[in-house]
């Protein structure tokens, strides 16, 4: 049910045509809820038939002219209902994590290269989110609506930050897979003389 609610949200922010909605999904909403052109048009038809939205009257009717839609009171009520009800968090399902688990039993061929590719993609997405933050949420822009929208963007920034850090750590681990881990309590690179309390009499041949 989330796509129709995403469309209702977008139309309440600004009445739009199907094409304009598609562009807005590509630029903003699509960062956290993607939809194809066909899916958006299909949901617009359903929302209109259910009485949640209506096509705005055109000032100059013309054949093939794109219809713009606005949300009706029933649509606003449905969005408010959906926003207020409790929902469970979705469990994590990530193919890369499953592939890493599988590589522990069948080998790691190809995984490291793909980890580097994923790191590059997440770094680019993080940079894009940070540019949006600078552009759309400068200091002082703190209306309640702006603060809530900024929270959504912050979720994207924090998530991409997590993935870039995790992938960097994963690549470090791949570079050291063949190394033996230090013994518990050992100081990496330390000899007996470096261990506190170990004098010459404590060193054994």
Image (spheres, rainbow, N blue to C red):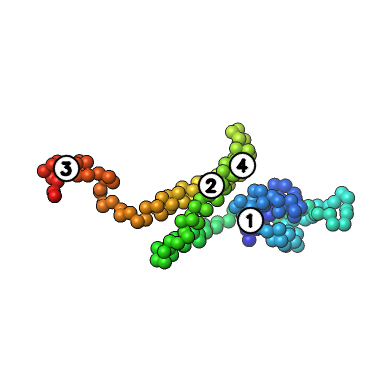
The Cα–Cα distance between marks 3 and 4, rounded to whole angstroms, is 56 Å
Sequence order check: which comes first, mark 1 or mark 3?
1
Q: Which residue is mark 1?
A: 34
Sequence order check: which comes first, mark 2 or mark 3?
2
| Disc 3 residue crowd, few under 14, some 14–19, many 20+, Cα 10 Å | few
Q: Position of residue 178 (x, y in %)?
A: 35, 56
Q: Residue at x 40, y 66 (%)?
A: 105
The Cα–Cα distance between marks 1 and 3, rounded to whole angstroms, is 62 Å
As drawn, the label of residue 123 is 2
Determine whether label 1 and label 3 are within 8 Å by CB: no
* Circle 2 SS class: helix
| Disc 1 residue crowd, few under 14, some 14–19, many 20+, Cα 10 Å | some
* Circle 4 SS class: helix
Sequence order check: which comes first, mark 4 or mark 2?
2
As drawn, the label of residue 14 is none
Give the foreground label among 1 and 3: 3
Q: Which residue is mark 3?
A: 198
For the question of whether residue 108 can be seen, the reply is yes
- Decide if residue 40 is on the left or right side of residue 103: right
As drawn, the label of residue 132 is 4
The Cα–Cα distance between marks 2 and 3, rounded to whole angstroms, is 46 Å
Sequence order check: which comes first, mark 1 or mark 2?
1
Q: Residue at x 71, y 58 (%)?
A: 37
């Amino acid at each position: 049910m989330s796509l129709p609610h995403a469309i209702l949200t977008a139309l309440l922010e600004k009445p739009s045509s199907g094409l304009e909605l598609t562009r807005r999904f590509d630029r903003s909403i699509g960062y956290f809820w993607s939809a194809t052109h066909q899916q958006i048009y299909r949901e617009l038809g359903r929302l209109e038939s259910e009485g949640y939205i209506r096509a705005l009257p055109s000032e100059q009717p013309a054949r093939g002219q794109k219809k713009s839609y606005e949300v009706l009171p029933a649509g606003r009520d449905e969005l408010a209902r959906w926003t207020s009800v409790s929902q469970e968090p979705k469990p994590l399902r990530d193919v890369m994590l499953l592939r890493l688990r599988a590589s522990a039993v069948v080998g790691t061929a190809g995984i490291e290269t793909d980890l580097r590719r994923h790191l590059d993609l997440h770094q680019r997405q993080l940079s894009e989110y940070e540019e949006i933050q600078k552009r759309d949420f400068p200091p002082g822009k703190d209306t309640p609506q702006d603060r809530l929208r900024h929270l959504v963007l912050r979720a994207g920034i924090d998530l991409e930050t997590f993935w870039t850090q995790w992938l960097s750590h994963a690549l470090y681990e791949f570079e050291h897979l063949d190394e033996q881990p230090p013994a518990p309590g050992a100081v990496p690179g330390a000899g007996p003389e470096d261990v506190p309390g170990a004098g010459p009499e404590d060193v054994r041949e």
